[in-house]
Structure formats: structure tokens, C-alpha cells
Amino acid sequence: MARRSLCWFMHGCLASLIACAWPPTASAEDTLTWLLRDLPPLTIFEGPQKGLGALDHLMPMLQERLPEYHHQALHVNRARGMQMLRTPSLTCDPSLLWTPERAKYVAFSAQAFVVVSNGVMIRRSQQAAMAPFIVAGHFDLQAFLQTPNARLGAIAERSYGPVIDERLKSTDSHKLALHYGNDALGSLLQMQRLGRLEAVLGYWTEIRYQAMQQGIAPDDLMFLAIKGTAPYQRIYIGCSNTAQGRQAIVRINQALEDLPQAQVQNAYALWLDPVMREQYLKDNPHFFQDDPQP
């Protein structure tokens, strides 16, 4: 009897050692919380086009390839989303730009998809007044922000890419209208319509969609790429930089390799105007041939 007890004890110790040495894996009970923003045309929460965004198309395919997790979606604004990524939880955001600051507390995936870069939107009625800042079809954001009465609308806690982010960091706060609300861009467009802002930062697809929701004709608006920025931006999935979050990123990277990239890029391209769409589909495959890890 003593010998049998000793054997059970040894088996128990061996099992414990194996459990400690083996890397942790996700179980079906692990809940992965996806932080989603109302960011048309990537994600669309309400209206007749609800669920038809490019990211709405990507997420089910991604989740299907991660069956070991229970997936739940949480609708947040950008500021709240970044706050949650700083917490020790299994939380991921599927639409992040990589920045050195975010890399301190976010574990990033490989490239998920590519979008047309952020730019500046002005009203066509103000084109003559803004002409000094338009050079060869690009907007000189630095020169604009150096003028005394400049007022630029932006969404709080959002990264617009390295060039734009640096410009904003060195700008007097009274020249920036930072909006934290869930309908931040719509509110900024209304402020611009009322003459309280000269320009608004954002993605053209997002601006055009929100303008129509606000009753603003897209033809009344003029979108300009910003001087010194690349034409496209790489989008990544980011998770809280915890053991669980880093493990999730390993699995997410495996899932991304298995995704039909043509479907992903076409889902986004449908929201571009015909000229932009043709150029985007022509350029897009090159971004996946040399994918720099963040």
C-alpha cells in the first residue's frame, strides 16, 4: 500500500513539473475582449450599413481561426480603448497604428491590412483662404499650425501617423480642438461647418461617410494628403502586453497568415472612390511582400 501511495505521489510530482515547464495555452474558457470603435467604413455600428465595414468583414474570419477563445466585442471610443489596453487583461484592438509610445504597453501583431493615410479635410468654400498651405496638392500642416488663428480638429488619443503626431505634439493646445466623444468626428465636422474650425484630421473614407450622416455633401469637402506623409498606413492588431496578450498575438499572427488577403483588401477598397480604389488595389499587394514587424 505504501508503495502504491509512493507511486501516486511521484506521478503527481511529475505531472506538476510538466505543467510548470510547458508554455501556457489558451483554453475555451479564456475570453478575448475586442475593443471596437465606430469607425466607418472599417466598423459600422448603426444604420442601414451596420456590420458592412471592412473590419466587420475581417473579424468573423479572424475569430473563426481562433477557436480556443471565447470572443466578445466591446464598443469604446479611442481614449477609453487605449486606457483598457494599459490594464492587465486579455484585451485586443484590431485597428491600431504602431507608435513607439504604444509599444511600451501594447503587444503588436504582424501587419493586418493597409489603408489610405490620414489627411486634412477643408471646406471647398474655404479653398481660397487655405491656398497658402496647399502645395502641389498636399497640405502643409506645419505651416498652417504656425499661423496665429489656426484651429484644427482631431480625435483625442488617436495616432494619425508619425509625421502628423509630431506636428500635434509641438502645437499650442489652443490651436487644437481634441474631441473625446463617441461621435467625435461627426461633432468636429459640425464645428467646422459652423466656422469654429478651419480643418479636420481623419481618413477620407471615414470623413466622407460621417459627412453624409451629418447631412453634409461630400462634394462640399476637399480632402488633402499631408506634406511629408506616406500615401498608405499599415494597420496592426494590438493586445495588452501581458502573458495572455502576448500569447494571443502569437495565435493572431498565425491566423493572419491564413486569411484570404484579397477579400480583406477588397472589403476596404469598396469604400474608396473609383480613382483611389484603382490605385489602392494596384499598390496593395506590395505591402505584403515586405511586411516590417513593428
Image (tube, helix red, strand yellow):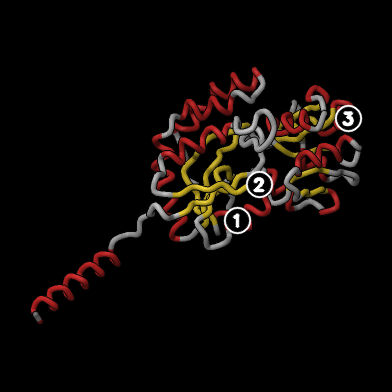
Front residue of 191/148: it is 191
User: Spatial distance from mark 2 to mark 1, Cα to Cα?
Assistant: 10 Å
206 displayed left or right of 103: right
Q: Position of residue 200 (x, y in %)?
A: 78, 38
Q: Position of residue 263 (x, y in %)?
A: 49, 26
Residue 234's mark? none
Determine if residue 29 is in view: yes
Per the rendering, the mark at residue 101 is: 1
Which quadrant holds the N terminus? bottom left
Instruction: Answer few, some or many: residues within 10 Å of disc 2's Cα (few below 14, many 20 plus, some between 14 and 19).
Output: some
Label 3 or label 1, whichever comes before in sequence order: 1
Report if the CB atoms under discs 2 and 1 are less than 8 Å apart: no
Tell me if 25 is positioned left or right of 49 in this view.
left
The answer, for residue 135, to whether it is visible in the render is no
Q: Which residue is mark 2?
A: 159
Q: Are marks 3 and 1 in contact (CB under 8 Å)?
A: no
Residue found 51% across the figure and 30% down from its top: 264
What amino acid type is highlighted by mark number 2? Ser
In the depicted view, which residue is nearer to us: 110 or 3?
3
Left or right side of 2 for 171:
right
Kindly identify the residue that appears in the image at 82 percent across and 40 percent down: 144
- The quadrant holding residue 47 is top right
> Which residue is rendered at x = 75% and y = 39% of the image?
201
Disc tally is 3
Name the residue carrying label 3. Answer: 126
Q: Amino acid at mark 1?
A: Glu
Q: Position of residue 258 (x, y in %)?
A: 39, 35
- SS at mark 3? helix
Q: Quadrant of the rendered structure where residue 195 is?
A: top right
